[in-house]
Amino acid sequence: MSAGFVWLVGAGPGDPGLLTVRAVECLRQADLVLYDRLVAPPLLSHAPASARRVCVDELAPAHPDRWPLVNRMMIDAANEGQRVVRLKGGDPMIFGRGGEEAEVLRAAGVGYEIVPGVTAALGAASCAGIPLTHRDHASAVCIVTGHESPGKPDSRLDWPALARFPGTLVFYMGIARLEAIVAALLDAGKAADTPACVVQRATTPGQRVASAPLAELPAAVREANIEAPALLFIGEVVALRERIDWFSHRPLFGKTVLVTRPAHQADDMVRRIEVLGGRSICLPAVTLAEPADWAPVDAAIGRLGETGWLVFTSANGVHAFIARLRACGRDLRALGGVRLAVIGPATADALRGYHLEPDVIPAEYNSEGLVAALRERVRGSRVLLARADRGIDLLRDELSSVAEVEQVAVYSQRDATLEDSPEALAALRAGEIDFVTLTSSNIARVIGSALDPEAVRSGRPALVCISPRTSAAAKELGLPVAAEAVEYTTAGVIEAMCRLSAQIAEGVIREV
């Protein structure tokens, strides 16, 4: 078997969007991913489904016992011909043991590549509004381990030199020894009023910052209840964060959003929410499956030559229909004489993924809008509606008065068992959710069964609906709707949440 290979890859400081393109390329080739506990879980999805994923923190409870096992796993896997990604938080060469692991691999004759990552100091500083260097305040940066006790007799740290350092000090892994670090710097002559702060869970929706003059920082950190993982910044540049901070001013910062879409469709909404500063918790309310009987779909595919219009009301319908078309031994040429209509932009994008351009996208992204756009166009034609096995029949009923309409279920939609997502359900019931997104009537009905009507009426959580029809389904359950999308899309739901969050911040709407 040919020799394998190891990539020592920096995973970045926490935000999945800060992973490098090269890191993604490596992950996509992996047979084995050895990752640290602090690596953001979404990053693991870049690896093939067949790749083995091992959290190194689970190999042994103590650091000294863990690293020999990690080294052995990398070497053994590479010698077996496997492609290994050693995925580390931040940058592998800054307090990531990347140098030590590279030495071990070289000694074992294993090929490797070191892939840099955005280290925590850079990520935390940028997202806290701290310029590590500034023409008027700091021309140098010193990155220091805070893991070493200042009172250690054989310490390699020169505390008087650090106290005199003419720039910004950044301490990694120093929260447990914060008081000792501050005391050592003050004893060595660092000014007590030097601006300082601690940044917890940097670059993520859970980021928190505690600022104070250096002498008062330990008390400020205790009061804010900040814990590891966190970084310590000391220097004049810290005082600039009040002016430069952008991270905490994003429209959904500090808000927790329940995303209720099917699991395979949640990623886009989750990422949009996180970019706007929110934290997402996923609780899928519906699941998708194949229809109980493919015969009606197969028969409809066989009659495509007689069909004038093919109408899709969801991206799921597009993917399911095209997949079945191929399963029947046909390809996109079967649609050569068929005109295509979709209910909205997301469905249009799904079609475009197959190099098909819709002929009709209604101005209003709902069934009523699609009826209005199609009524005269389909008159006298044969129309095929490809959709889920449940939902309203408005399209079929309205278009049947002017055309021959056949409706087939290309996928089945079922209520999810909410208990299958116990952590998300617990967060909802514990009152940890600010906004609940409802993107269909069926989702509103399923999630509504888990909500406390009194809590919803008090404003927490606040329900944000994608359309009037979805709002009506919520209201039928006695649940008030706090916001409704103007445009009936994912983007519209998020825009409605941002408006609602701004109204709460301005005191227009009371937040409980």
Image (tube, rainbow, N blue to C red):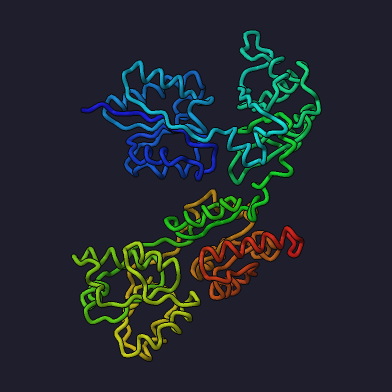
Q: Find residue 30 and report its image quarter.
A: top left
Front residue of this view, candidates 398 and 353: 353
Would you say residue 449 is visible in this rendering?
A: no
Where does the N terminus fall, quadrant-wise?
top left
Q: Position of residue 186 (x, y in %)?
A: 77, 20
Q: Is residue 147 above or below residue 311?
A: above
Quarter occupied by the C terminus: bottom right
Q: How many marks?
A: 0
* In the image: residue 296, left or right of residue 216: left
- Residue displayed at 40% across by 44% down: 46
Q: Residue at x 60, y 73 (%)?
A: 475
Q: Choose top left, top right, bottom left or bottom right for residue 349.
A: bottom left
In front here: 312 or 392?
312
Question: In the figure, is residue 119 to the left or right of 409?
Answer: right
Q: Position of residue 215 (x, y in %)?
A: 79, 26
**Residue furthest to the left:** 329
The residue lying furthest to the front in this view is 135
Give percent across and percent down for residue 147. Answer: 61, 21
In the rendered image, which quarter is residue 35 located in? top left
Residue 79 shows in this picture: yes
Image x and y of residue 185, in percent: 74, 20
> In the displayed image of the protein, which residue is found farthest to the top?
153
Q: Residue at x 36, y 65 (%)?
A: 352
Q: Decide: is 385 above or below 224.
A: below
Q: Residue at x 32, y 82 (%)?
A: 383
